Amino acid sequence: MLTVTAVYKGGVLLPATKIDLPDNTRVKVQILTLPASQAISTAFGSLAGIWADLSDDDLAHTQQAIAKSRQKSSRKVKHLTQRPARGQ
């Protein structure tokens, strides 16, 4: 399942991000209007609701994977900041 944010203009839905589908692909569209405060025009806006259909187990697994990735990244950044600059 793919969730994207789009704007309805001139009788056409215009996605906020590129959708990689071949021409003439049939899709099912579910319309959920967003309040103006949630209509994010950044790349992250297209991720709204991406985990809405995950089971509790899948969501917990995803959250754990993200936390593990963040910890790994933090260790790398900390290690890089403690290294002396080249030539010193």
Image (cartoon, rainbow, N blue to C red):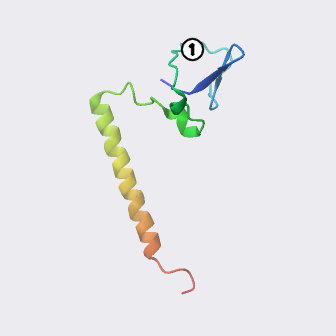
Q: Residue furthest front?
A: 36
Q: Quadrant of residue 26?
A: top right
Is 12 rendered above or below residue 69?
above
Foreground of the two, 50 or 40: 40
Foreground of the two, 17 or 87: 17
Q: Is residue 4 left or right of residue 8?
A: left
Please, what secondary structure does the residue beneath circle 1 have? loop
Q: Quadrant of residue 82?
A: bottom left
Callout 1 amino acid? Val
Q: Residue at x 57, y 85 (%)?
A: 87
Q: Position of residue 18 (x, y in %)?
A: 64, 31
Q: Position of residue 22 (x, y in %)?
A: 65, 21
Q: Position of residue 42 (x, y in %)?
A: 59, 39
Q: Position of residue 62 (x, y in %)?
A: 35, 39
Q: Residue furthest right?
A: 10
Is 12 rendered above or below residue 41?
above
Q: How many marks?
A: 1
Foreground of the two, 72 or 11: 11
Q: Residue at x 69, y 13 (%)?
A: 11
Q: Is residue 67 left or right of residue 47?
A: left
Q: Quadrant of the C terminus?
A: bottom right
Q: Residue at x 39, y 27 (%)?
A: 52
Q: Is residue 2 left or right of residue 58?
A: right
Is 30 rendered above or below residue 75?
above
Residue tagged 1: 27
Q: Residues within 10 Å of mark 1 (few under 14, many from 20)?
A: few
